[in-house]
Amino acid sequence: MMSTSKSPTTETIHPTFVILGSGGHTAEMCKMNQALLRDQNTYQKKYQPVRYIVANSDDTSERHLRVAMPSVTKDSDFIRVPRSRSVGQSWVSTIFTTLWSLLWSCWLVWRDRPQLVLCNGPGTCVPYCYAAYMWRLLGRLPAHSRIVFVESYCRVETLSLSGRLLLPLADMFVVHWPALAARYSHKPNIRYFGRIL
Amino acid sequence: MHLKVVYVTVGTTKFDALINVMTSEEALCALQKHKCQKLVLQHGNSTPVSATNLSQINNKYGIQVEQYKFRPNGEDIKAADVIIGHAGAGTCMDILSNGKPGLIVVNDELMDNHQLELARQLASERYLYYCRVNEVSGKIATLDFDALQPYEPATENMQKFVNALNELMTH
């Protein structure tokens, strides 16, 4: 996986990065992926290949997706990455693990050059979006690459911390409830489709 | 509507007030009127009910009480006629995605208000009910769980999202 050699004659493949969190976040992302990657979506090939980013401490998300979408996930990689902070971790060591996970996100985004980073709220997604934004500015990612953030379903009136950090740079920022849509209606990247889950 | 099996869940929280109110005389009387036979308490980090109390409830109301701290609760949810739980997003989703009548109880001692926002929103769209802990017994007695709206998958809206994403990715 680390040593994918790219033939210079073929066009570079730009995968979709889907950042998974835990529990509720994964279940929501799973439903969106099912809608996006099913055959009825004539555009679904465009998103292939899909690479799922999972925290190395998370052993349920991969199984959840493989069971729910066997035909899609058989061709997908699940990339295990370090977490920035585990529950109960001390403050000092959190600095180092956060830096380490930041480096990882920069490296993975640089290596794979995703055309789309799709995420829905877990804290792990923040460095990936910033890395994609930075590498696009620096020309490593194609100019048409996109960052899409779907706010957590349980945020009705206020944005999550991840949401507030990513609102300035997401190309599309989806909210689930009318109160949030109204509050941020002045932001051009905010989209509200009604309840989608 | 008969509430033969009632499932109470607090997730990982400590919610003694809910466990206490569910084993109070008023609540048990209300449950008895709904022909309740079994009360399952997932008490998490709350104080469990004492063994003597459990057998008293069984003798007095004919309600068998089962309690446990944590376990995978898919079966408990499917077996329940109504779910009474804390305002966690997971509990709300369990209620909706299993098509169960639900009553969400607000824990006044918790400050985590954004989860409360979800319960309130879902209640305003009549997908579930929502109340404070001192109202629980009265609500069990009077609420019409048949009047709740079924939570249908929002296929059309999801398609709008997919279309918007397709469009965004066209270049």
Image: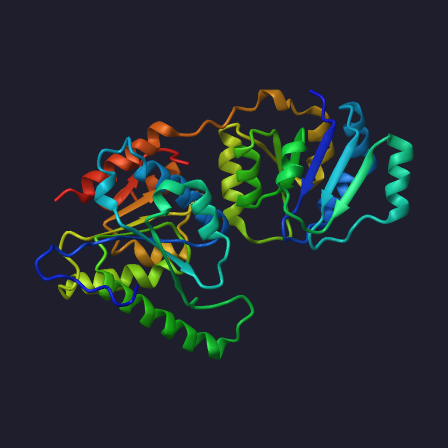
Farthest-out residue, left = A9
Q: Is residue A185 left or right of residue B26?
A: left
Residue A90 percent location from the top left of the image: 52, 75
Residue A31 percent location from the top left of the image: 40, 39
For the residue pair A135 and A184, the one nearer the viewer reads as A135
For the residue pair B81 and B15, the one nearer the viewer reads as B81
Q: Is residue A191 above or below residue A105?
A: above
Q: Residue at x 64, y 22 (%)?
A: B144
Q: Is residue B149 left or right of residue A37?
A: right
Q: Residue at x 45, y 49 (%)?
A: A25
Q: Is residue A166 above or below residue B137?
A: below
Q: Is residue B44 above or below residue A88?
A: above
Residue B101 percent location from the top left of the image: 61, 29
Q: Is residue B40 left or right of residue A195?
A: right
Question: Which quadrant: the C terminus of chain A?
Answer: top left
Q: Quadrant of residue A79?
A: bottom left
